[in-house]
């Protein structure tokens, strides 16, 4: 073998070595970029800004007690089955609830109870309900209720993911240690599941729905109001219930 053949062989070996080195470098770069992208996907949701929290208008609820308002001895109990992600539930909250409180709950005609319907629309529905119940431990169920509805932006779009709910908790000055412990422990998971079962037992298939319950001659009677109805509809049903009771 002459020197010329040896030189060509060495050149080929050098070319192969350079290509292998180049391939390894490309592989390392691709792996590094992939790892960085994966780390971004994991870290970014926890560091991105949570956005502005809209402050809910102040609302008066007489004798507020956890998720209820009014006199529990009132002749009529109105149970709302709702979902914090439901746009019609927000319409009821914005347009009718305050009038209902003023005209029937404050005078003692009706006792009002709010119940969730579990994860009726999605996981964020349950998370929002948990946040409201955990706020209720600190006497601020209704403040959280109002803040959640005021910040509703759509269904399952991240409006009520945990960091947003935590921001709501800060906005209404909750004790964050107690609130975080409540949320992390799933303290109200069973209650929310029971809400869902109660809704199913009552035949609830849409939110918001309202069950008016009262007694006539010792027997419980019920009336159902479906949808974000006006105060006139509630007035009509409440007056009919009072007439049934002879009042």
Image (spheres, rainbow, N blue to C red):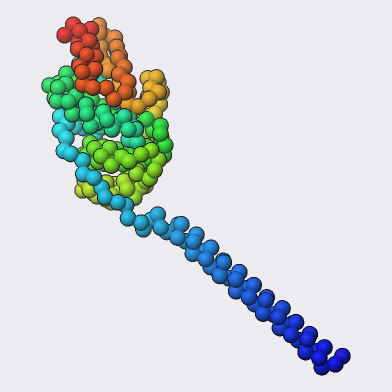
Lateral position of residue 233 relative to residue 190, left or right: left
Lateral position of residue 47 relative to residue 17, left or right: left
141 vs 24: above or below: above
Number of numbered discs overlaid on the protein picture:
0
Q: Name the spot of residue 220 as percent of width and height, x first.
A: 29, 12
- At a point 67% along the width and 76% down the height, the residue shown is 19
Q: Is residue 35 visible?
A: yes
Q: Residue furthest front?
A: 4
Q: Quadrant of residue 211?
A: top left
Q: Name the spot of residue 217 as percent of width and height, x first.
A: 25, 6
- At a point 18% along the width and 39% down the height, the residue shown is 57
> Which quadrant does the C terminus fall into?
top left
216 vs 141: above or below: above
Q: Name the spot of residue 225 as percent of width and height, x first.
A: 30, 18
Q: Name the spot of residue 242 as percent of width and height, x first.
A: 20, 11
Q: Residue furthest left?
A: 107
Q: Residue furthest bottom?
A: 3
> Which quadrant does the N terminus fall into?
bottom right
């Amino acid at each position: 073998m002459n020197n010329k053949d040896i030189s060509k062989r060495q050149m080929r070996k050098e070319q192969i070595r350079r290509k292998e080195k180049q391939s390894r470098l490309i592989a390392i770069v691709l792996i590094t970029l992939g790892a960085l992208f994966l780390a971004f996907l994991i870290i970014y949701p926890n560091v991105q800004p949570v956005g502005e929290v809209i402050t809910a208008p102040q609302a008066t609820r007489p004798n507020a007690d956890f998720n209820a308002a009014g006199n529990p001895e009132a002749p009529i109990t109105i149970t709302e089955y709702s979902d914090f992600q439901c746009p019609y539930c927000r319409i009821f909250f914005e347009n009718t609830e305050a009038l209902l409180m003023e005209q029937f709950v404050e005078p003692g005609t009706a006792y009002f109870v709010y119940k969730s319907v579990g994860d009726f629309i999605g996981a964020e529905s349950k998370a929002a309900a948990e946040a409201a119940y955990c706020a209720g431990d600190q006497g601020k169920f209704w403040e959280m209720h109002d803040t959640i509805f005021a910040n509703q932006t759509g269904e399952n779009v991240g409006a009520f993911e945990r960091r947003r709910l935590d921001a709501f908790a800060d906005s209404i000055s909750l004790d964050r240690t107690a609130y975080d412990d409540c949320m992390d422990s799933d303290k109200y998971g069973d209650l929310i599941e029971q809400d869902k079962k109660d809704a199913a037992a009552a035949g609830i298939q849409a939110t918001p729905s309202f069950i008016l319950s009262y007694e006539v001659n010792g027997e419980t009677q019920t009336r159902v109001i479906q949808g974000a109805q006006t105060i006139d509809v509630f007035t009509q049903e409440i007056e009919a219930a009072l007439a049934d009771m002879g009042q």
